[in-house]
Amino acid sequence: MKQETALMRGPNDPGLQNPTRRTLLLGSAGAMAAVSVLGFTPLAKADEPKSLPDYAAWKERNALIVHSTNTMETQRGAIGNGVITASDRLFVRNNLPAPPASVTDNPDVWEVRIEGVKNPRTLTVGDLKQMGVTTVASVLQCSGNGRAFFPHGAGGTQWSVGAAGCIMWTGVPLKDVVEALGGPVEGARYITSTGGETLPDGLDPKTVIVERSVPTRAMESALLAWEMNDEPLTHTHGGPLRMVVPGYYGVNNVKYVKNVAFTENQTDAKIQASGYRIRDVGVKGAPDQPSMWEMNVKSWVTAPLESGRTGRNMIYGVAFGGTVALEKVDVSVDGGKTWKQARFLGPDLGPYAWRPFVLAADLTAGEHRIVSRATDVEGNTQPEGRVENERGYGHNGWSDHGVTVAIS
């Protein structure tokens, strides 16, 4: 069934249960080399951004928009044409201060408690490395990516398109760990992951703790990851261990994961009970509202962004389907009046990865509104507009995500 205007897949969507969807299972060693991945467009020298905080000081400063100490966005022009996002250009979004950087000094001793299984157990990262390994390419995207386009001034970081990137995650499949511990207990409907961030003193932990529940169908692709882009998972991005749920919004990919439980109900932590819920403008969050789980189909143009010469121009962008593989991407240079199908660039790394695309277009002098519109293999297509909601979540409308380019 086509989904021309839907914001997100509902709670009854088959999601990750569909056994026909391919997953990428590559050996960790040399995975990045096999991809020939980066292919970046050089950045124009611009005003130097704000200083980066110490925990992210290794990032490429000129590739990022620094919104705050805990929020840094990849500039649209720094996304480039490659399949994989370089770690030093990847956006940063933290809900709480990170634990001490020393937790990554000896990552194999980090412990995670697995509960809601027949044989509950506390495991170290070293233990997990003996239980299995896989590498999965997956888009990491903040729920509020595109929030800056909402006219009502949705609260939160004003992300444009750069709160997203495509990452190679290496770790143990969660289902392998669960099978080794006897399987989930009867009645388990959710996977609830708890982060190990430092909690502020004097507050009820449930009001601030990063603890997220996702449907158990996510276990088919979820992994406990200790590497990102073939390197040990950095403290900045959740190391030494992170829950990764391919196809799901970033908040569900819990950093510094210290507890994973199979539960009958969703956690009552505020970040789940009322946070990251889709509701009308002016309405408070509540547990009966749709949660930010599976991502929707989306694309945007990455070049050109401001100007170009008359004649042949190469239009680049990225597109992804969330939990569903892409079928095609169409591009328009006249604001959506006419469309031409683009071609994908680089290797197909599976349904959870994004696909860079390109279209060669002959452009005349004047202004051109360039937009892209992705369609997945199930027929879901990006809508033209946005679905208005209080926090500016899940925006995949193609009109707002376009660029106006002056051709001379």
Image (spheres, rainbow, N blue to C red):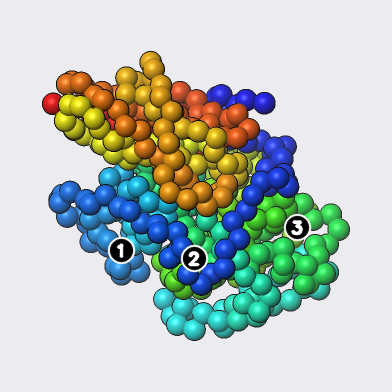
Residue that numbered label 2 is attached to: 31
Asked whether 138 or 125 is in front, the reply is: 138
Q: Is residue 75 above or below residue 236?
A: above
* Dot 3 and dot 1 residues touching (CB under 8 Å): no
- Which element carries disc 2, helix, strand or loop? helix
* Amino acid at the residue labelled 2: Ala
Q: Quadrant location of residue 15? A: top right
Q: Is residue 272 left or right of residue 55?
A: right
- The x and y percentages for residue 376 are 56, 34
Q: Residues within 10 Å of mark 3 (few under 14, many from 20)?
A: many
Residue 286, visible in the rendered structure: no
Q: Is residue 236 left or right of residue 60?
A: right
Q: Residue at x 25, y 32 (%)?
A: 313
Residue 59, which numbered label? 1
Q: Is residue 155 above or below residue 261?
A: above
Q: Residues within 10 Å of mark 1 (few under 14, many from 20)?
A: many
* Amino acid at the residue labelled 1: Lys
C-alpha gap between disc 3 and disc 1: 37 Å
Residue 263, which numbered label? 3
Asked whether 21 or 2 is in front, the reply is: 21
- Which element carries disc 1, helix, strand or loop? loop
Asked whether 75 or 392 is in front, the reply is: 75
User: Considering only order in the chain, which callout, 1 or 3, is on the residue closer to the N terminus?
Assistant: 1
